[in-house]
Image (cartoon, rainbow, N blue to C red):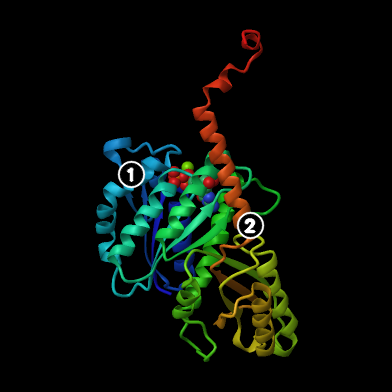
Amino acid sequence: MKVVLIGVGQAGGKVTQALAEFDYEMGFGAVKSAMAVNTAGADLRELDIDTMLIGQDRVKGHGVGGDNELGSEIMADEAIEVMDGLEGSLTSEAEGIFVVAGLGGGTGSGGAPVLARELARIYDVPVYVLGILPGRNEGSIYQANAGRSLKTVTREADATLLIDNDAWHSAQESVEEGFDNINDAIAQRIGLLLASGEITEGVGESVVDSSEIINTLRPGGMAALGYASAPASEDAGENVNTITSITRNALLTGMSVPNVVEAETGLLVIAGQPDRISRKGVERARSWVEDQTGSLEVRGGDFPMESDRVGALVLLGGIERSNRVDEFMERAREAHEAEQEHQRDPAAEFKNDKLDNLF
Ligand SMILES: Nc1nc2c(ncn2[C@@H]2O[C@H](COP(=O)(O)OP(=O)(O)O)[C@@H](O)[C@H]2O)c(=O)[nH]1
Ligand SMILES: [Mg+2]
């Protein structure tokens, strides 16, 4: 699937760059262009893709802190300039636009929904948001920001592909230490998904094409991606169980949003050497995904590539009703309420021993 990427904010820019680099290094050619937009000049200077500084008149290149309302105001004022900056890259070739952002901060959190809305007004191709959710250990302001942003972004984007920062980092490292590794994992997995719709060599009927990705994201709302891989035998007949077990791992332990069980749609992509991919394994794996998610619309396809491993990518569309998303929204709501309470309850400040005696 040929895409244009626009990163908004710090996480957005870094993940966009990681995706563009992975696509380029692998020679896939799915990423047609990549640009990063930010209110913080310092964050942009760390990138080597095209960049655009916005909000200079208001924050003078210093960023918006965690103020996502300011982030959204600035984007509303300058979305036209941002889109002008993209003009050359949004050729007739692009099949979709991905706005990439961390939803817990300020610039990306506030800016991504506004930019998605403006892009959707102008372009016919679908506008998706690749949204990063803060991990459990991030502060309550991040949770509250992300909750608010998630609501808006799912309304404005054609679909929002979510990645929980707790999902794809190894247990040994903290989220902060692990950002580069998480970004690499995101780049590889999303990168493979996009590339899977691009392979035309050695095509069999079973090869994935872009429209299957688009159709899987068609329900809108929230989407998630899972991945797992394992060594493959040279004999396809011996890989039946390998394919079913990597599919199970992708869905049960490898999802970008953990514990998603129900989905409206699914796409199962099996990546590997064509003569190692067992048709029987693929069919079994696909009907298992249908059973597991309750979806009656699970597509399937191969992604032929040179490797002695096989990989399973599971894209799920319309995941609103998952426990993990509910849990996140609950966390965000609590954080938001705590913040409100803090702001509007001056009485809380009088609750100390000295004053108790006065009443
Ligand atoms: N996966 C990932 N998350 C990040 C990275 N940098 C920041 N984040 C997370 O993204 C959210 C927003 O932070 P940031 O992008 O710095 O905010 P912004 O620059 O104001 O949009 C927070 O929840 C961060 O924890 C990164 O490089 N990778
Ligand atoms: Mg930051």
Q: Secondary structure at mark 2?
A: helix
Task: Determine if residue 48 is in view.
Answer: no
Relative image position of residue 132 (x, y in whole percent): 52, 54
- Residue at left offset 52%, top offset 91%: 205
The one nearer the camera, 302 or 354, is 354
Q: Which residue is mark 1?
A: 73
Q: Secondary structure at mark 1?
A: helix
Rendered view: 283 above or below 173: below
- Residue at left offset 64%, top offset 81%: 286
Q: Quadrant of the C terminus?
A: top right
Rendered view: 245 above or below 160: below
Relative image position of residue 189 (x, y in whole percent): 56, 66
The one nearer the camera, 100 or 18, is 100
Count how many numbered circles sit on residues in the image.
Answer: 2
Relative image position of residue 226 (x, y in whole percent): 61, 67
Relative image position of residue 11 (x, y in whole percent): 48, 50
Q: Amino acid at mark 1?
A: Glu
Q: Amino acid at mark 2?
A: Arg
Q: Which residue is mark 2?
A: 324
